[in-house]
Amino acid sequence: MTPSRILPDLQCSLICEDVRQESSGNFILVGVLNYINVQQLPVTALKLCFFNRWTAGFGQFNESVRLIGPDQVTVLRKSDLKFALQDVNLHATNVTVLGQVKFETPGAYFVEVLVDDVMKLRFPLVVNIVQPPPDKKGSGPTAVV
């Protein structure tokens, strides 16, 4: 008996500033984000790219990427994408771009990646308010005579 459908594994999920593709088909990830440091809020991210790679599945699927607020309930943004895997030895790479994402408060936002309503991964994206670096003018070494 040949399986008609096997739910895929999520091999990786990364947030970055941009994703580019070479003529060879390979991807270049620009500015992989660990956190977002800003001097004040609210702030709007021009775009956030979510790079997801699926493998070891067979059939047609629906990927959902959700950005959840610090209250862990509010869905700030959501994107759905259909994809297929024709063989369990193949992979599918999906790039979701969310534009004009507004962050109102500091804290841990959460990224959720689902396939056919099954959560495969949930991870934090922390937004921090940081102080600007001190002004360096006049703070150089002092000569002692």
Image: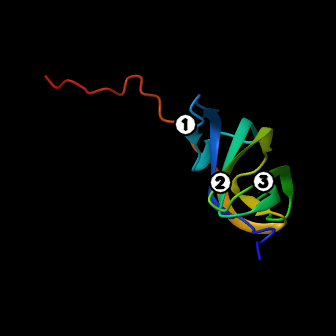
The quarter of the image holding the C terminus is top left
User: Of marks 1 and 2, which one's residue comes earlier in the chain?
Assistant: 2
Label 2 Cα crowd, 10 Å radius (few <14 / some 14-19 / many 20+):
many
Seen from the viewer's position, the closer of residues 102 and 34 is 34
- Tell me the amino acid under the disc marked 1: Pro
Q: Is residue 121 left or right of residue 31?
A: right
Q: Which residue is found at the position 73% from the left and 56% from the top?
A: 85
Q: Do tag 1 and tag 2 residues touch (Cβ < 8 Å)?
A: no
The quarter of the image holding the N terminus is bottom right
Q: Which mark is residue 91?
A: 2
Q: Position of residue 70 (x, y in %)?
A: 76, 60
Q: Position of residue 107 (x, y in %)?
A: 69, 57
Q: Position of residue 42 (x, y in %)?
A: 77, 41
Q: Is residue 130 left or right of residue 138?
A: right
* Quarter assignment of residue 13: bottom right
User: Tag 1's secondary structure?
Assistant: loop
Which residue is identified by label 3? 84
Q: Is residue 111 left or right of residue 18?
A: right
Q: Residue furthest front?
A: 1
Q: Is residue 23 above or below residue 51?
A: above
* Quarter assignment of residue 96: top right
Q: Position of residue 11 (x, y in %)?
A: 61, 59
Q: Which residue is found at the position 71% from the left and 41% from the top?
A: 48
Which residue is identified by label 1? 132
